[in-house]
Image (cartoon, rainbow, N blue to C red):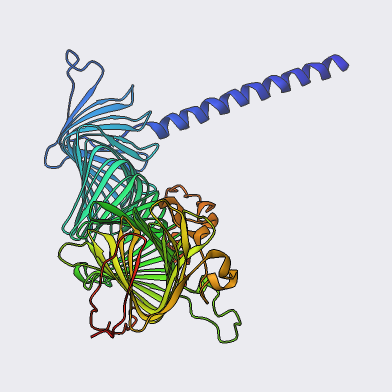
Amino acid sequence: MSKILNLVQKLFVLFLVLFSSALSFAQQDTLAENKQINIVYGGTFTKDEAKYPGASIFSMDDRQVQFEHQGADLWCDYAIFHQKENRLKAVGNIRLQQGDSVQMTSGKVDYDGNTKLAKAWQNVILEQNPGMRLETDTLRFDREKQEAYYKDFGTVIDSTNTLTSQIGRYYMETKKYQFLDSVHIDNPEYKVDSKQLDYYTSSKNAYMYGPSTVTGKTYKIYCERGFYDTKVESGYGIKNTRIDYNNRIIVGDSVYFNKAKEYASATNNITITDTINNGIIRAHYAEVFKAKDSVFATKRAVAISLVEKDSLYIHGDTLMITGKPEKRIMRAFKNAKFYKTDLSGKADSIHVEEITGLTQLIGKKIPKDTKEINWPKYYPVIWNGENQMTGDSIHLISDLETEKLDSLKVIKNAFIVSFDTIGKTGYNQAKGIDLYGKFLENTLDEVDLIGNTEVVYWMYNDDQELIGINKTICSKINITFVNNDVEDLTFYVDPDGDIFPEKDLEEELRILKGMVWRGDERILTKDDIFDEDDNNIKLVVIQGIENPIDIDAEEEQRSKNASDPVNNLPTNVASPSPSSKAVVTKSKSSKIKAADKKSN
């Protein structure tokens, strides 16, 4: 009995093995059948074993030959079908239709049913709805991956642009083109040229890799890694980016541009060049507004301009440049400083007007409740050589024709002070209500102090031996300079004073009331215009361009810097008219001459 049971079990196992094998063969046959190219309409049938061994030849009669393969139909005039190898060669007026959205036409096609690869040539046109058309001479179409590829130049036309390149690959599912070598986009409003470019036919977004240029009617963009929305002419670059925009050249680690908003911004290591006025702005964040013809810059911002073969550097926490080229106004706000070789200064704000040649150094408004009326940081200061000049506000005026410094005004609480470099124990000081200076070849030549003037001056003979300390009051003082050193002092209108031996003049009388020496603040080099906070700025990390990118999120991120507060300071301060010029009597070096007469 047990032997019979064992035999039955063995027969049952054998049955299962045979059944599984039969099922597997059946499935393989089904798969093979599914992969097989099917003849829908054969037209006229012939064979030519000598030329096409094993192949069936089909020619159109009153209608074209038609084949079907896994969701695609192909029509042609003539076909050589290798049924065993599951491949065919189609010739003449070919149309390959895949679903309702993809259609390809050409003169010839080689198609492999096993790999679903088609090679088409002779006037190939690939179309995908809605509104995309690819034209090339030879195209390889991978139906398995839904990709098309050409390497012998192609043209893509959609509802917005015409694109050409030497090499291209089209990803049908994402509607993305990857263009290589000699990429060009042609649009009535702009042109794009790139080494490599990815383009999405649905969004019309372009991603640029390698040297790329976008040329619009009012702008030109260059970058080596960037994004461009061709629908609205907006984009940015994050590698070696430059934008020529509104008579300005903007260069930075990351530069953004939006034509509709007439706006550009840049981040990190920025240089903005004014191509008309030959000025430069450097910063780590900047915005350009075309409609207002203005620039906003911050984060170690500095404006650089050429003044008589010497560079002038102006720095502030915030820089603003507004107005047309011939009427531009530059404002440096908060802790503003400037430097050129023989002249430097600082103030709460600095205003420069192109049309008038006026540069204003404006002090900070003193709070009403402050008790420290002479608190130095509230007042502007300039240094000319060893001479320190301070006052409520300071004006520098340039000659509009020669662009050289012409004159100087210090308005209210005017002081001119220098350290006594011979005795090294005191300060030469002169004060008045206002100060008016004159430059000669960009060097301070003379100044007039007007109103309630006083002097403390250390006098030496030719052997640099101290004669005494001159302390005088009068209505006006004229000071002339040679090589930024005091040459002569002339007193006007009832001068009252004397030369005191050093031992006879008390320490507190050697300092004029309100004088504050600010030598430790003096700006000696162009790097001194930056303080510790400026030098410790941490640059933001420039994000890479993802593919595709969320443009709305990107614009929102960038707009966070658009509303940085900027003080609305006055652009002009009225200055009193100087009195009629008095006759200045020159004297020898280190001597003082008093003109005991009233000014005319």
The answer to which of 57 and 340 lies nearer the viewer is: 340
Whole-percent x and y of residue 477? 34, 75
Quarter of the rendering containing residue 77: top left
Looking at the picture, does residue 339 appear above or below residue 46?
Answer: below
- For this view, does 407 lie left or right of residue 350? left
The quadrant in which the C terminus is found is: bottom left
Q: Residue furthest left?
A: 62
Quarter of the rendering containing residue 23: top right
Whole-percent x and y of residue 79? 19, 30
The answer to which of 155 and 173 lies nearer the viewer is: 155
Whole-percent x and y of residue 265? 37, 60
Is residue 413 among the parts visible in the rendering?
A: no
Quarter of the rendering containing residue 63: top left
The residue sitting at 23% across, 76% down in the picture is: 583
**Number of numbered discs on residues:** 0
The answer to which of 266 and 527 lies nearer the viewer is: 527
Is residue 530 among the parts visible in the rendering?
A: yes
The residue sitting at 41% across, 31% down in the picture is: 33
The residue sitting at 52% across, 58% down in the picture is: 520
The quadrant in which the N terminus is found is: top right
- For this view, does 493 lie left or right of residue 502? left
Whole-percent x and y of residue 211? 29, 40
- For this view, does 583 lie left or right of residue 177? left
